[in-house]
Image (cartoon, helix red, strand yellow):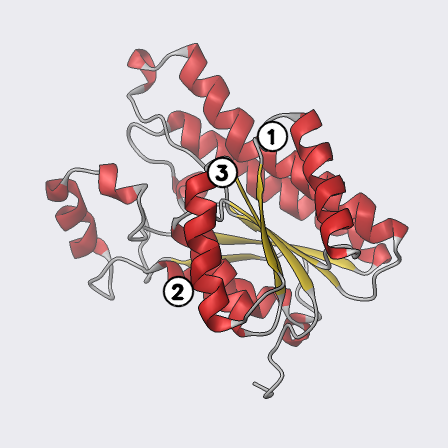
Amino acid sequence: MTSAGLLSGRLALVTGAASGIGRSVCEVFAREGARVAAVDVQAPGLQETLKLLKSATPGNHYAFPTDISLPQSVAEMMDQVSKQFQDVPTVAVNCAGITRDNLLIRSTDEDFDKVIDVNLKGTYLVMKAVAQMMMTKHVECGSIVNIASIVGQYGNIGQCNYSASKAGVEGLSKSAAKELSRFNIRVNSVLPGFIATPMTEKVPEKILQQVTKLIPMQRLGTPEDIAEVCLFLASKRSGYVNGASIEVSGGLRM
């Protein structure tokens, strides 16, 4: 790492920035010199994130409360980001995601639609908007990182909706990588395993203990574990990595 940081001077847009993996990505990116556009539907959480960023890199970080499942909301957010920074993002990390866990036969259409709208459609909307902005400005090294999940590859009991959404994110990323690479934009996905975040706090302790026993490293991952991989994919050090799916699961195979 250079003294200037791996992302020095670059503008990074991060969704899901109010907590968990998204917040950690913001912290790591700020540490590495990026200006951060923190995006989330939870405005109070965004403000807490900004306080953490100011302790690492003073100024140049702003919050944009946004419902990424709504096209108009995403369009307005992108316009605000452009005006606030007088620049376009050259890095985007889509971390926003929700769960509505239940067995297939007990799940509701409303819960299925909501998970797909946030996790998959939201990723699509933000990625499309960011890519269009990057293309307009002819960026030299654009990078989009989408947070998928190992659940999207292996499935999980009680998570048909979540598994479907994350499998979609991975497929979306691979197709976009083929389309956008000629515009100097790389697209990759990160597949976390079980990570200690507010999302996993909803899982019963007994289940978490059982899962931990199946992880060769014998621990849950941390948001920082994921954020550091996102940093690599965002930086020029991964300049020939495109369309990849990187598992960060401690070796867990579900």
Tell which circle, 2 or 1, labels the residue nearer the N-terminal end: 1
Q: Residue 192, can we see it?
A: no
Position of 138 relative to 63 (above/below): below
- Can you give x and y, in whole percent of width and height, for residue 141 in the image? 77, 66
> Which residue is outermost to the bottom?
3
Mark 3 element type: helix
Q: Dot 2: within a 10 Å radius of its alpha carbon, few (fewer than 14), some, or many (20 or more) residues?
A: some
Q: CA distance from mark 1 to mark 3?
A: 11 Å
Residue that mark 2 sits on: 225
> Which residue is outermost to the left?
206
- Can you give x and y, in whole percent of width and height, for residue 102 in the image? 29, 22
Give residue 39's quadrant in the image.
top right
Position of 166 relative to 108 (above/below): below
Q: CA distance from mark 3 to mark 2?
A: 19 Å
**Do the CB atoms of the residues marked 3 and 2 lie less than 8 Å apart?**
no
Tell which circle, 3 or 2, labels the residue nearer the N-terminal end: 3
In the image, what residue occupies the spot 33% across and 18% down? 104
Mark 1 element type: helix
In the image, what residue occupies the spot 86% across and 51% down? 135
Which amino acid type is shown beneath numbered disc 2?
Answer: Asp
Can you tell which of label 1 and label 3 is closer to the viewer? 1
Q: CA distance from mark 2 to mark 1?
A: 26 Å
Residue that mark 1 sits on: 121
Residue that mark 3 sits on: 166
In the image, what residue occupies the spot 66% across and 47% down? 174
For the residue pair 217 and 46, the one nearer the viewer reads as: 46
Q: Is residue 178 left or right of residue 163?
A: right
- Can you give x and y, in whole percent of width and height, for residue 1 in the image? 56, 85
Q: Residue 183, can we see it?
A: yes
